Image: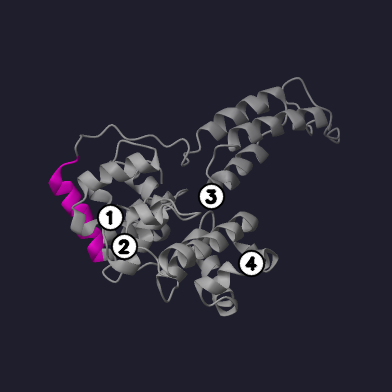
């Protein structure tokens, strides 16, 4: 006797998964947006993937909340409970490792002078150096001096830098900065932190990049998203605010290493110690890193 055909109707023991209703999707979307609001841009894709894998039911929304909250980001990463201050020999081992890995380290923003560097650094906010380097040749060809950029029509600047993101705000900043350099500093980029901080769009990170790279002046430590992430992973800071991180790094890292350390940590963050999946297995710093193999 032939076996009866298999039923496609849900049984009491196993139910078929149904598509979430529009209202459930809307509820889940609200959860995702709320959780993603303060998440670093580089991790928002992970937030979205975590949400997409879960259903839009009430239980699924709860699971989404828990899953997304476990994504370690710039906003959620906490300092490790490690010995403080860090042992000088561990700090030295980290510095030696970085020097061995990146002996030819340099700023990866293409520039010919201090003015081009300050403009490129302003454009690099929430943008990759690669994208900035694709944008600046045409920009500097069109406006080759601070005086020329100070007189640039805003709509032309905006179009030239559109691909870097936040282009309207950045156009205002680079135009105002160029004008201030012409009017207050004779077209030259100043060599002090206090003077640089008077320029629109310039905070301590940009000022440290310009002073260290263009002039070789160690006024502080550059703290961008890579330095912030790696300093916490390496437990060489207890802070999460960039300014506070810089202050601690200035006490932990010898001053003669400030400039190279910043660039080397940035290179390491891009090449090995990524935000989502650090390559601890092939990391020369892993023996000296309290976070090794905890996030990979």
Is 37 included in the stretch rendered in magenta? no
**Disc nearer the start of the sequence (3/1):** 3
Residue at point 59%, 41% (across, down):
47
Going from N to C along the chain, the mark reached first, 2 or 3, is: 3
Residue 212: % across, % down: 31, 62
Q: Nearer the viewer, residue 152 or 214?
A: 152
Q: Tell me, yes or no, whether the highlighted magenta stretch contains residue 91.
A: yes
Give the residue drawn at x 27%, y 62%: 217
How busy is the neighbourhood of tag 1: few (under 14 within 10 Å), some, or many (20 plus)? some
Which element carries disc 3, helix, strand or loop?
helix
Q: State left or right for residue 99 relative to residue 227.
A: left
N-term-proximal mark, 4 vs 2: 4
Asked whether the beta carbons under mark 4 and mark 2 sit within 8 Å of each other, the answer is no
Q: Are marks 2 and 1 in contact (CB under 8 Å)?
A: yes
The residue singled out by tag 3 in the image is: 42
Disc 2 crowd rating (10 Å Cα; few below 14, some 14-19, many 20+) is many
Q: Nearer the viewer, residue 252 or 181?
A: 181
Highlighted range, magenta: 86-100
Instruction: Give SS at disc 4.
Output: helix
The location of residue 48, given as percent across then percent down, is 63, 42
How many angstroms separate mark 2 from mark 1 (CA)?
7 Å
The local secondary structure at tag 2 comes to: helix
The mark found on residue 212 in the picture is: 2
For disc 4, the marked residue is 157
């Amino acid at each position: 006797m032939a076996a009866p055909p298999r039923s496609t109707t849900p049984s009491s023991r196993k139910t078929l998964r149904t598509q979430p209703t529009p209202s459930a999707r809307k509820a889940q979307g609200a959860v995702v947006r709320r959780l993603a609001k303060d998440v670093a841009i580089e991790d928002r894709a992970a937030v979205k993937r975590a949400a997409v894998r879960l259903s839009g039911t009430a239980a699924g929304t709860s699971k989404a909340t828990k899953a997304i909250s476990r994504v370690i980001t710039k906003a959620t990463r906490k300092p490790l409970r490690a010995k403080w201050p860090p042992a000088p020999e561990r700090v030295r081992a980290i510095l030696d490792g970085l020097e061995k890995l990146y002996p030819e380290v340099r700023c990866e923003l293409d520039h010919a002078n201090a003015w081009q560097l300050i403009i490129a650094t302003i454009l690099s906010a929430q943008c990759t150096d690669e994208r900035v380097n694709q944008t600046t040749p045409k920009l500097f060809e069109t406006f080759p001096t601070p005086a020329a950029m100070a007189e640039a029509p805003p709509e032309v600047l905006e179009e030239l830098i559109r691909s870097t993101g936040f282009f309207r705000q950045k156009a205002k900043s680079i135009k105002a900065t160029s004008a201030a350099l012409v009017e207050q500093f004779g077209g030259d980029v100043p060599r002090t932190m206090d003077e640089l901080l008077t320029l629109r769009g310039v905070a301590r990170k940009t000022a440290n990049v310009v002073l260290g790279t263009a002039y070789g002046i160690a006024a502080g430590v550059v703290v961008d998203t890579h330095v912030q992430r790696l300093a916490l992973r390496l437990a060489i800071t207890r802070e999460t605010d960039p300014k506070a991180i810089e202050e601690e790094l200035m006490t932990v890292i010898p001053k003669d290493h400030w400039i190279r350390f910043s660039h080397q940590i940035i290179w390491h963050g891009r090449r090995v110690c990524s935000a989502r999946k650090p390559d601890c297995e092939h990391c020369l710093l892993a023996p000296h890193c309290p976070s090794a193999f905890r996030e990979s």
